Image (cartoon, rainbow, N blue to C red):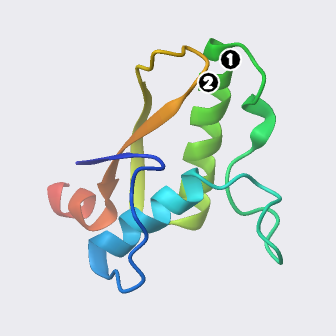
Amino acid sequence: MTTITVGQMPIDFGASGRAEILQNVNMIASTIQGTVPLDRSFGIDSRAVDRSPDVAKALFAASVIMAITEREPRVIVEQVTFEPQEDPDKLVPVIRLQFVDESEAST
């Protein structure tokens, strides 16, 4: 099981293996759909913006799970939670995931 905090991972252009996969997950979860030229469906749905914190958390978590499941098949999202912030309207997602090769080894 691995946990990443979205938006707090530097880009490593030479990443490979699990580091590459984690970087991909971070990129997917921190990109708003419609902002990537030639691939407007890449990223997460922005409908959570300007919603109440509870609704935004639910929408964002669902969008993250769907986007990662579609774009990065080498991981399984186990849980999406949010880091507590001083500003309750600021959401900092924390994604708990499992690498597919780990889940196959444990079954």
* Closest to the observer, 96 or 85: 85
Left or right: 21 in relation to 25: left
Residue 96 position by quadrant: top left
Residues at badges 2 and 1 in contact (C-beta under 8 Å)? Answer: yes
Residue under the image location 33 percent in, 63 percent down:
100
Residue drawn at the location 72% of the way across and 52% of the way down: 32
Percent across and percent down for residue 23 are 42, 66
One can see residue 74 in this view: no
Q: Amino acid at mark 1?
A: Val
CA neighbours of label 1 inside 10 A, class few (<14), some (14 to 19), many (20+): few
Rendered location of residue 65, percent (x, y) = 55, 45
Query: On the rendered structure, is 42 left or right of 15?
Result: right
- Image spot of residue 21 (x, y percent): 39, 69
State the mark number for residue 58.
2
At mark 2, the secondary structure is: helix
Which mark, by number, is residue 42?
none
SS state under label 1? helix
- What residue does disc 1 label? 55
Q: Observer-nearest residue: 1 or 33?
A: 33
> Where in the figure is residue 42, as x and y percent of width and height?
71, 63
| Amino acid bearing label 2 | Ala
Q: Residue at x 76, y 19 (%)?
A: 51
Residue at the spot 67% in from the left edge and 29% down from the top edge = 59
